Image (cartoon, rainbow, N blue to C red):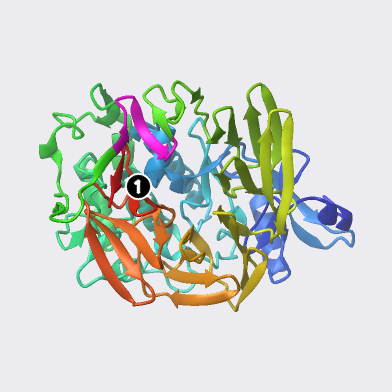
Amino acid sequence: MIITRSFLKTTPQLCEGGEGIIFEKDGGLIKIYKSHINLIEKKTKLESLLKLSVPKQVVKPTELCYDENNKFIGFFMRKVIDGIELKQLSNKKTIKSLSITIKDILRVLVQVKDVLKTLHKLGIYVGDLNDCNILFDKNFDVHFIDCDSWSIGGVNCNVCMDSFKDPFLKSDNFNEKTDSYAFSIMSFKSLTKIHPFGGTTNPDMDLLQRMNKKISVIDNQNVTIPRTIPSWNFIPPRLLQQMKEIFENGKRELLTDNLDDYNNNLILCKKDTEYYYSKFTTCPYCDVTAKILDKPVKIDATGGPQPILFFTSEDIQFILSLDSYVNKKGEIVHNVINGRTVVNTFGTKVYFVNKDCYVEDKGTELIIKYNNSVNTLKKKYKTDVKVENGFVYFISNSDQLMKVQPLPGGNGIETISKCSSNSIFDYSGGSYFICSNYSHMKVIQIDGNYYQMDNNTDKIVNYGIHRDAATGYWLFIYETDKNVFKTFVFNKNELKFSNDLIRYTCSLKDMCFSNATIFAPTDGFIKGFSYQKNAYKDFECSVVTTDSTLIRDKNRFLIINEKAIYTFG
């Protein structure tokens, strides 16, 4: 397939990674490699892959791509429709909002395991096996992507996500054992909603240290687990013991028989509407005696303010945000408007603008529905959407931060700023923050002011952007692929604070920033950090967990939990 310069210049980029840029073409996708990539190695690997009969779940190249001078530049592949990264199986909000069951998760994991077995027989090793490189669709069928990084035909994989990396790996000698180790981490994380080396220890160690020292969470009383993580006594004992042997005792094998046994012996508990292993005498979700780990000790608030129930309903299955929740019918409800519901569609996020208007984010497009009016706008794949005061903010396919005012007769559209093809943003209180990611630097934009972070090649795997309404400053926190958290405070084009030693146990998007203090939810506390004083202070609050979302509302907190919202302060 010949890819012309004209096509590359006029076709919007779908997304960009470390090795290449993705474009849509003829109902499929093409990946064009960047200039620093060894094209000879890539071509050799892809030619080997083209000759092999691999499982249908592998999104392999179907044709190599060349430029007008017949120089190899990339490949063409099929497009996965409505694919969701497998890491979302460990996201409790995704699980709740999409009503994903243990049965669905096991269906995904068994498929992944079966594909790995077939690839290993062909002498292929994924190497960089992690829960971002596998997608699942609404039928819970899996799709392996980024296969051009695999170890194939004597050309090895040369990259690996640290949180899935086998401590026994030497150089780039990926093999069946390293894939088995990564798959065990993926399986445990998907089932329990925590990394097998997650939680905290005293003295505290980061995740990679724990992996090397083989200190997992299984049967380990020296590891503190967030109290919102339920006991994993629902996992069949033999499967759990096999995982423990892999994480702590150096065993390397695929979770074949025990995983299949779990998947093939499921029954539905009518009380919890969840599937459990049928060889348990009672449902482990109902029977507390089935638990193998105690929850951390709960510290009740003593003295000071007490949390006050602000909003709840018997109809709530899961609260999505301050103004919406999923009801027991699986519908999304705008809790500000009695009776207003929206169908909860797989892979679609819903944002309410006002009583007459809501927005559906389908990944690559926004559907704005205003009463009987429907308008569609193209957006950058996997970028966020923000709704505030009747306006919708998003990044367009042309790499611009856009402001849209939905109106009964159409939309008022305004371009706020240009950004890179790999950008993240937030908008709050009439101010915007953009982080544009380039190969060797990051550029911060705040209301037209710029700050350049040179020699910054960090890969951002998790982030939170928050504005302090009192000072106008912006807090930017992100986690790298090496499990390092970086905390920055900006004022327009000035960096006021920077730190890479602080660790966070909550979602970075669930924090808040007010009066020069960073607030994070932890079990039984709101942890406040004054970056100016370099000092912490804990505020006891019995209803707060690491899964809570904090919003600062004047002199009080709004605490959003799974089925209730509280005020505090």
- Please tell me how crowded label 1 is: few (under 14), some (14-19), or many (20+) other residues with Cα within 10 Å: many
Q: What is the total number of numbered labels drawn onto the structure image?
A: 1
Is 464 or 198 nearer to us in this picture?
A: 464
The image quadrant of residue 450 is: bottom right
What is the magenta range? Answer: 310-323
Residue 412 lies in what quarter of the image?
top right
Residue plotted at (68% across, 43% down)? 404
Amino acid type, callout 1: Leu
Q: Mark 1 = which residue?
A: 558
> Residue 346: in sight, yes or no?
yes
> Depth check: 416 or 83 in front?
416
| Helix, strand or loop under label 1 | strand
Q: With respect to residue 309, does 278 lie above or below?
A: above
Q: Is residue 345 left or right of residue 559?
A: right
**359 relative position to 173: left or right:** right
Q: Is residue 547 above or below residue 458?
A: above
* Residue at the spot 89% in from the left edge and 62% down from the top edge: 69
The x, y position of residue 357, in whole percent, is: 59, 30
> Could you say where residue 203 lies in the image, as x and y percent from the top left?
21, 73
- Taking the magenta stretch, the answer to whether it contains residue 281 is no
Q: Is residue 267 left or right of residue 480?
A: left
Residue 313 magenta-drawn?
yes
Q: Indicate whether 237 appears above or below 103.
A: below
Residue at 52 percent across and 71 percent down: it is: 490
